[in-house]
Amino acid sequence: MGTFSRIAIGLIGIATTTFGAILIYRHYIDIQKLRNIKILRAKREVPSADSIPSNHVARSQKNDKLDSSISPEEIRHLVSLLPSANTTKFFKIMKTLIQLSNDNTNIPSFSSHDILDKLYSQLTLGGDGEFLRSVNVHVLNLFTNLVVDESIRDHLKVKIDQFFDAKMSALNMNEMVALFRLLGNFSMLNDSAKAVAEHFSEIFGFIAHESAPVRRQAWTILLNLSCEPDCVLIMLKSSVSNEVDEILRNPFWEKDEIILSKSLKFLCNIYRSLPLLDYGKFSRESLYTNLLKTKDNLKLQTELHLSQVSSTEEIYEDIQRLSEILE
């Protein structure tokens, strides 16, 4: 591939990802490799399929997909600009990378270890200052998109322990949401879920966080982990603080129905596993012991709320299922 002679990056409008639509100009010394300017949009206007022959539509979509793909060399070049970029340029580059990663066809171009390591080196979790915090959010959001690729996930999952080396309480809400979104994607996949489950105690502590977006992401991780038998055992052996004990007794204090639904589904999955396990293998501080201790109270709360919820409400099935499991 020819050498870059110029890369100009500009923001156009506001995409549904909140990062803006990105206009990228790519020019090469070799004129034969010159590509047309492409605008990546969250929503793209297309002619009605009824007005165009189907074979023409198929060819057009295929060519557009090929033209819009980006090479590893181009990704590497953009990443190489980050350390020396000023604030404005840095975030324009990061937003461009995020926008490109929204297209799955581009994700393999990020898979080189040197690219991933240079991106990871930009993280300073626990660092102070608005710039550093914003950098963290952008890098974490980019990784959230990228870990759907197995080779990228294999390289980044070894960093999971390092994410928890930071003092979590020092992170602001945006950082926490971005980090938990990334961990949520890791927790959905068999080959990385256990690495997340090892940090159950830290994650579980955030189900009582004052921020609803943080609670929602924390419960998303826990619900994902509760679908993996190996992860369930890890969680049940983990210790939990007394601060979240009340949530196990009565999860219905949560007024956000999405969060409540996730928490009830998690409890269904976890309580379903308890009869199969030997009580003597768990410590007094473990989640397992706390679940047994709070079971009767949870059963009463579940029956009470079941009588108060209409069968047409979405949450009804979650409450009913938990009530049946607790019998």
Image: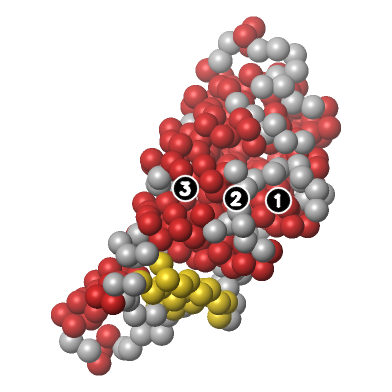
Assign a secondary structure to mark 2: helix
Distance from the alpha carbon under mark 1 to that under mark 3: 22 Å
Kindly indicate the quadrant of the structure image that contains residue 198.
top right
Q: Along the line of sight, which residue is nearer the eye, 191 or 30?
A: 30
Residue 287 appears in the figure = yes
Residue at 52 percent across and 17 percent down: it is 276
CA neighbours of label 3 inside 10 A, class few (<14), some (14 to 19), many (20+) = some
Q: Along the line of sight, which residue is nearer the eye, 246 or 82?
A: 82
Distance from the alpha carbon under mark 1 to that under mark 2: 8 Å
**Residue 6 appears at what percent x and percent y?**
46, 72
Q: Which labelled disc corresponds to residue 175?
A: 1
Q: Which labelled disc corresponds to residue 115?
A: 3
In this rendering, which labeled residue sits more in front, label 3 or label 2? 3
Assign a secondary structure to mark 1: helix
CA neighbours of label 2 inside 10 A, class few (<14), some (14 to 19), many (20+) = many
The answer to whether mark 1 and mark 3 are in CB contact below 8 A is no
The answer to whether mark 1 and mark 2 are in CB contact below 8 A is yes
Answer with mark 1 or mark 2, whichever residue precedes in sequence.
Answer: 2
Furthest-left residue in this view? 55
Q: Which labelled disc corresponds to residue 140?
A: 2
Assign a secondary structure to mark 3: helix
